[in-house]
Amino acid sequence: MSSAPPAPRSRARAAAKAAAPAERRTAELRVYLLVENLRRQFTAAMAAPTRARGYPPYEGQHALIVEVAPGLAIERVIDLALRAVPSVEPGILFVERQFGVLEVHGSSLEEVRRAGQAILDGIGASAGDQLRPRILYTDVIEDITDQHAVLINRNRQASMVLPGETLLVCEMTPALFATVAANEAEAAAPDITLVDVQMIGSAGRLYISGRSSSVRTARDAIVRVLESVEGRDH
């Protein structure tokens, strides 16, 4: 004896359940950076309108910068941080083509650390799960020409490079590592000029100018800090 066909409402529920996409509950941690003691020029660059879509940071504060995939998972990440530590302030919330980026900052290093731990716990990750940075290119160009300086200054988002200065260019991946690289470069050589920090996209890029000795000191600091980051290969 054959069984009776399911009721129309039951069939509709079953079809909707089968058609519904599976809910994604995990996110891939790509970058997890605690940037302590934000330096003056880097803070100003990060607080520019094209960067800080939220609350701008101040010199001397501490920042946590996170990148996850897929991009929209960053909305869960910011929720985890702000619910756990409401006193931290979000400066950047950005969903790019493939990844999501979040920057939060505060005057208390402990509170910024707790916000970061809440993120890690919430997505089931550890700081060591992030990608290890790779330097794709670096060069020191001495005695930059006036025409070259003009072209760079038309596209920069920080301070100006002057003709005759020495210019450091550095490209790395993931892009967000340009943040800690810029901050460490300024800490090691405070007299440098931070010309541009490109921290979102397929690769991060830094333009730094100044005296040759200071620029080389900044370059060495960038290499040291990026080589010290623990993470997985990519």
Image: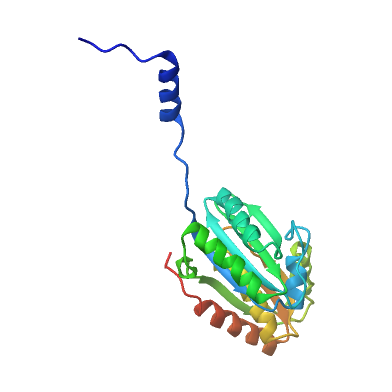
Residue that protrudes farthest toward the left in the picture: 1
The answer to which of 221 and 107 lies nearer the viewer is: 107
Q: Is residue 14 above or below residue 69?
A: above
Residue 109: give x, y in percent of width and height. 66, 76
Q: Is residue 36 visible?
A: yes
Name which residue lies at 60% across and 77% down.
139
At horizontal 61% and vertical 51% (from top left) the residue drawn is 75
Q: Position of residue 143 (x, y in %)?
A: 72, 82
Q: Is residue 117 left or right of residue 185?
A: left
Image position, residue 59 (x, y; %): 76, 76
Q: Residue at x 78, y 59 (%)?
A: 49
Q: Position of residue 57 (x, y in %)?
A: 75, 68
Left or right: residue 21 versus residue 148 is: left
Residue 24 as seen in the image, left or right of residue 219: left
Residue 77 vertical placement versus 188 (above, below): above
Quadrant in which the N terminus is drawn? top left
User: Could you say which quadrant of the image residue 202 lies in?
Assistant: bottom right
Tell me the quarter of the picture where residue 205 sits: bottom right
Q: Nearer the viewer, residue 38 or 132?
A: 38
Q: In the rendered image, is residue 171 in sight?
A: no
Give the position of the C terminus as an image quadrant: bottom left
